[in-house]
Image (cartoon, grey):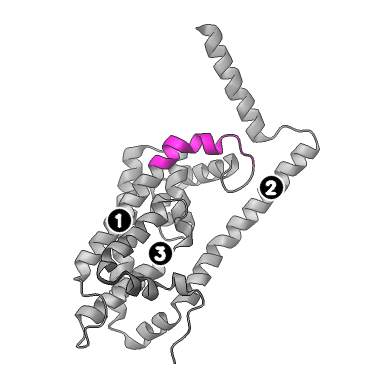
Amino acid sequence: MVHAALIPWLDPQNLIDGFGAYALLGICFIVFAETGLLVGFLLPGDTLLIISGLLTFTGTMTATGQGLDIPIYWLALAIAFAAFLGGEVGYLIGHKAGPRIFERKESGLFSIENVKRTNAFFERFGGLAVIVARFVPIVRTFAPVAAGVGHMSYRRYSLYNAIGALIWGAGLTFGGFLLGYIPPLADFVTKYIDVILLAAVLIAVVPTVYHYIQASMKARKKRAAGVPTDAEVEALALDATKFDQKLGD
C-alpha cells in the first residue's frame, strides 16, 4: 500500500516527475532557491536530495531503469554546486540589503535581535555554524543572509559555505543512492517522505516561533513602560554618530 502524500506539491518525487527531462535543472533550482532566496524555506531540501539519490539508483542500477538516468557523481556535484551558489547569493543579499531591513526592527523574524542572536552563534562556533546550518531546515535559508548582515569575512564564509554545500548537497544525495541497496528502508523512506519532512520542519520551527513570541512580548513590555527598545537606542546612537561626523566635516 502506497502512502498518500500529505503535501503533494512538496512531495519530492512528484516534483521530480513534474520536471520531466529537466529534472536535474529543477532539482538544482530548488536547492539554489532554498538558500539563495528568502522564500526557499517553503521548499523541500533534505528530502529532495535523498529521493533524488534514491531515484538515481533505481534509474541506473536496476533492471527496470525507472528513475533518474543520471550518473550519481554528476548529480551529487551539480547539487553541491547549486547549494554553494545559493549560499553565496544569500550572503550578498544580507550584506547589501540586510542592514536596511534589520537595523530598526526590534521584533519579528527580520529583527535586530535575531541578527544579534545569529551573530553570537557564528562567533561562538565560527565556520562550523555555517556548515551545521546546512542540515537544519529554515535555518539554512536565513543563515547565509544573517552572515551577510553581520559582515562575516566573505572569504571565510565562502570557504565554509563550499564545505557545507559539499557535505550536505553531495552527502545526502549519495546517502539516498546508498539507500537503494537496502530495499526495505528505501521503501519506507519513499512512502513516508512527507512525514519525515514535516517532522524535520517542526523541529526547526518550534524554537523559531518561541523566540519570535518571546522577542515580541519583550518589545511590547518596553514600549508600555516607556523604555526605549534596543533598536531605538541603536538608531539614536547611529544618528548621533552621523551628526558628529557632519560637525567634524
Residue located at (31% from left, 60% from top): 28
Name the N-terminal-most of marks 2 and 1. Answer: 1
**19 relative to 181, above or below:** above
Residue located at (29% from left, 81% from top): 180
Q: Nearer the viewer, residue 175 or 70?
A: 70
Name the N-terminal-most of marks 2 and 3. Answer: 3
The answer to whether the residues at label 2 and label 3 have Cβ atoms under 8 Å apart is: no
Spot occupied by residue 112 in the image (x, y as percentages of width and height) = 58, 39
| Helix, strand or loop status at disc 1 | helix
Residue located at (27% from left, 55% from top): 81
| Helix, strand or loop status at disc 2 | helix
Name the N-terminal-most of marks 1 and 3. Answer: 3
Q: Can residue 151 be seen in this view?
A: no
Range of magenta residues: 92-106
Crowd rating for badge 2 (residues with CA inside 10 Å; few <14, some 14–19, many 20+): some
Membership of 101 in magenta stretch:
yes
Which disc is residue 216 wearing? 2
- The residue that label 1 is drawn on is 82
Closer to viewer: mark 2 or mark 1:
1
Relative placement, left or right, of 92 versus 117 is left
Q: Can residue 23 be seen in this view?
A: yes
Q: Which of 124 and 76 is in front in this view?
A: 76
Residue located at (30% from left, 46% from top): 159
Relative placement, left or right, of 178 versus 63 is right
Spot occupied by residue 18 in the image (x, y as percentages of width and height) = 35, 72
Spot occupied by residue 236 in the image (x, y as percentages of width and height) = 64, 24
Which disc is residue 45 wearing? 3
Quadrant of res 43: bottom left
